[in-house]
Image (spheres, rainbow, N blue to C red):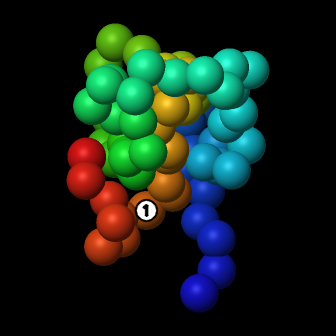
Amino acid sequence: MGTTSIKYGEHNVMAEDIKTVSYEFNEEHPLVNQVCVFTGTLEKIIRKEAMQSVVDVGGKCGDGLKKKTII
């Protein structure tokens, strides 16, 4: 199965490209170690920023829906 990319504007955003600079997370945060996928149109934030917000609190982003995807 190939890797897919998500388009926004003229750029492709891949989940594996989103990195965080922090490796200490609040283990109580509901997104820690959870896989999130953004689908459809985002109205108030660009996709890359939304994905960055997830990884910055300890979550993971995916490029497509899978069995492990919770959000």
Q: Is residue 47 visible?
A: no
Q: Position of residue 11 (x, y in %)?
A: 69, 37
Q: Which residue is mark 1?
A: 64
Name above or below for residue 6 compared with residue 48.
below
Name above or below for residue 20 compared with residue 14.
above
Q: Position of residue 36 (x, y in %)?
A: 37, 46
Given residues 44 and 27, the one toward you in this image is: 27
Q: Position of residue 28 (x, y in %)?
A: 31, 25
Q: Is residue 40 visible?
A: yes
Type of amino acid under label 1:
Gly
Residue closest to the far top: 44
Determine the secondary structure under disc 1.
loop
Q: Position of residue 53 (x, y in %)?
A: 49, 21
Left or right, residue 69 beside residue 10: left
What is the quadrant of the N terminus in the image?
Answer: bottom right
Q: Residue at x 49, y 54 (%)?
A: 62
Dot 1 alpha-carbon crowd within 10 angstroms: few under 14, some 14 to 19, many 20 or more = some
Residue closest to the far bottom: 1
